């Protein structure tokens, strides 16, 4: 059957205004939309775009205080910089490619990308107000969904220079959303650590750093370190580093104050320079794996004309910066080790132990791989998908659901997207890995099979899926399985969690229906509301995933599925939580169980 032909002529050609295009293709400008459950969701990107402009003012030496407030869905940001030029206030927030960041005399190390950010905030807000103060005067403009509705100018002789922005993200774009203040607090702390001397007030809570990235790294790793944190700062680069007792590597990288969660060329150059500095100091040829195992580091660079791989600026792409970052990192590492002999000795012992451990682990991996081939018929079936993360754009949204029980697996398999959704079924409860050596998990058949399914048995760089979603029953057994899996990933593959690959699937607890309508409810409040709205209703309580039919399950893992990202505040906090919940029984733990769980 041939497709219906449509005319293609001048009448079909449309020209959109700048802000209309942003509203129609918002993902091109702010990445994902989301609902506020993920720190990379669009509502947080809007705040970041406004604050980035305030940070740029501080970087250029204007204003050392930023005030941010959040009440319900209304966001306010006030900086004390130079203020937007009063005669250009409307253009600066509504016309793309308008701004001063093309001029090195005005902004040398800008986070913003050529006058897009604030325009996106304007376009994607149901209400947007901007007010600039300069030399005792002010100019103000108010927009609704990108359309100018009013503007005025006047005198403000007693008001300090700067810019005030107020906006409400548009529910027509974002749907129902809620801000998680914890995400914003973390971002404010990052800003403060990257800009020593800057004071940020978020809902009147003060964020300020005296020691820059040293403070940031210390807040992440705590006192569980092998030697004192090394620190180096110059005009264009700042970094801090240490070794601790966790598996893998952990880094926090920034460009012109922008957190690059996916790293990029600056982080690669830092890791290379670190290795070269260590080998130069010790006059050895240690492998990168042995030097960097257990490494925690933070790096921030200032560069002109940063090239990011997307508008959300999560990964840096500049290739011309590698040489000077490698050389300065190497020099900084060597200088620190020369001046800190105790740290140098502790680092070398760590590297030697890493090398010994790696060789032992490789032997265990070899045995596990051979054993897996022999018992391949008993490996739980992985219902794989067609496209994976290494396939580029085709596999960008690839997802693996880790579930338990054949009934739940059967429902998910029959309704999944075979191109992008894989199902892995556990055989009962996984092993509690807390306090176990890494070699032990390779000897555990179930966990090794899971690692092979994910493609991470040799390196997390080989991860086959963009999202790892834990899908368990919403009962005590399901929560226990979930905790066991999270313990496994947080202990041995924390980098996957930090990179935003781990999620929890939310499934409905109740179904409320009558003869005309069905409503699925995820908590008791939603159930009660549904019962009020449906007359003659029938309520079903789902005890497990297996009770949900394939026809019903399809909508819960489709485009509108509810998944909650696994977020960790800091490495030191994670260690304490895992020890309390998954470690040995202590008096405090027994008391908590008796008072809260029995």
Image: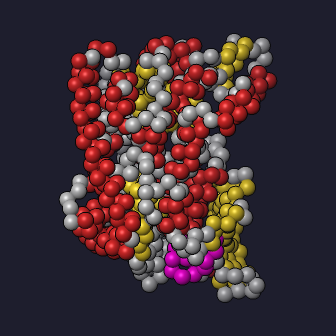
Q: Please give the range of residues in magenta.
A: 54-66
> Which residue is pictured at 34% across the width and 54% down the height?
350
> Which residue is pictured at 37% across the width and 32% down the height?
440
> Which residue is pictured at 54% across the width and 45% down the height?
574
Position of residue 237 in the picture relative to residue 524 (left or right):
left
Residue 51, image x, y percentages? 58, 66
Position of residue 566 in the picture relative to residue 239 (left or right):
right
Position of residue 63 in the picture relative to residue 307 (left or right):
right
The image shows residue 87, relative to residue 141, as above or below, that is below
Residue 262 in sight: no
Q: Nearer the viewer, residue 216 or 425?
A: 216
Residue 199, image x, y percentages? 63, 72
In the rendered view of the protein, which quadrant contains the C terminus?
top right
Was residue 151 drawn as part of the magenta stretch in this picture?
no
Q: Nearer the viewer, residue 114 or 466?
A: 466
In the rendered view of the protein, which quadrant contains the N terminus?
top left
Quarter residue 382 falls in: top left
Residue 12, image x, y percentages? 42, 47
Residue 439, image x, y percentages? 34, 35
> Which residue is pictured at 31% across the width and 49% down the height?
354
The image shows residue 341, relative to residue 372, as above or below, that is below
Quarter residue 288 falls in: bottom left
């Amino acid at each position: 059957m041939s497709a219906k032909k449509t005319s293609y002529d001048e009448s079909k050609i449309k020209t959109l205004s700048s802000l209309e295009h942003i509203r129609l293709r918002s993902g091109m400008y702010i990445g994902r939309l989301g609902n506020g459950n993920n720190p990379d969701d669009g509502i947080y990107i809007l705040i970041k775009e406004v604050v980035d402009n305030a940070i740029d003012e501080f970087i250029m030496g204007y204003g050392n205080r930023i005030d941010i407030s959040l009440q319900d869905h209304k966001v306010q940001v006030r900086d004390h910089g130079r203020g937007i030029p009063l005669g250009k206030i409307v253009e600066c927030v509504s016309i793309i490619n308008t701004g001063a960041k093309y001029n090195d005399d005005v902004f040398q190390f800008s986070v913003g990308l050529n006058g897009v950010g604030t325009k996106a905030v304007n376009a994607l807000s149901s209400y947007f107000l901007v007010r600039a103060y300069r030399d005792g005067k002010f100019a103000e403009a108010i927009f609704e969904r990108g359309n100018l509705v009013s503007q005025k100018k006047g005198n403000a002789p007693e008001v300090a220079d700067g810019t005030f922005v107020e906006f409400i993200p548009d529910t027509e774009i974002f749907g129902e959303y809620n801000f998680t203040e914890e995400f914003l607090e973390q971002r404010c702390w990052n800003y403060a650590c990257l800009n020593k001397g800057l004071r940020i007030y978020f809902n009147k809570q003060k964020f300020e750093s005296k020691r820059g990235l040293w403070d940031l790294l210390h807040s992440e790793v705590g006192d569980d370190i092998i030697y004192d944190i090394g620190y180096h700062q110059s005009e264009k680069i700042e970094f801090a580093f240490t070794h601790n007792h966790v598996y893998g590597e952990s880094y926090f990288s920034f460009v012109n104050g922008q957190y690059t969660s996916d790293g990029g060329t600056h982080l690669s150059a830092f890791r290379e320079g670190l290795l070269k500095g260590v080998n130069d100091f010790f006059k050895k040829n240690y492998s990168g794996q042995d030097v960097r195992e257990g490494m925690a580091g933070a790096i921030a660079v200032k560069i002109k004309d940063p090239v990011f791989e997307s508008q959300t600026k999560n990964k840096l792409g500049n290739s011309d910066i590698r040489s000077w970052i490698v050389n300065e990192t190497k020099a900084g590492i060597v200088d620190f080790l020369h001046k800190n002999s105790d740290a140098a000795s502790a680092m070398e012992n760590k590297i030697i132990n890493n090398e010994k451990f790696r060789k032992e682990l490789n032997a265990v991996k070899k045995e596990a791989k051979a054993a897996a081939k022999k018992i391949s018929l008993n490996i739980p079936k992985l219902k794989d998908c067609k496209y994976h993360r290494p396939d580029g754009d085709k596999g960008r949204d690839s997802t693996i659901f880790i579930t338990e029980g054949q009934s739940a697996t059967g429902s998910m398999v029959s309704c999944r997207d075979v191109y992008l959704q894989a199902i892995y079924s556990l055989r009962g409860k996984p092993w509690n890995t807390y306090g176990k050596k890494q070699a032990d998990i390779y000897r555990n058949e179930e966990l090794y099979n899971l690692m092979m399914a994910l493609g991470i048995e040799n390196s997390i760089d080989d991860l086959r899926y963009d999202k790892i979603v834990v899908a368990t029953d919403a009962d005590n057994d399901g929560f226990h399985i979930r905790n066991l899996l999270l313990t496994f990933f947080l202990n041995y593959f924390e980098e996957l969690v930090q990179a935003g690959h781990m999620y929890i699937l939310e499934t409905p607890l109740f179904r409320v229906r009558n003869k005309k309508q069905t409503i699925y409810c995820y908590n008791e409040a939603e159930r009660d509301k549904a019962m009020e709205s449906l007359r003659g209703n029938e309520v079903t309580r789902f005890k497990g995933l297996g009770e949900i039919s394939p026809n019903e399950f399809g909508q819960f893992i489709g485009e509108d599925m509810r998944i909650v990202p696994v977020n960790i505040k800091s490495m030191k906090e994670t260690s304490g939580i895992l020890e309390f919940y998954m470690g040995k029984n202590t008096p405090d733990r027994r008391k908590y169980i008796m008072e809260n769980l029995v």
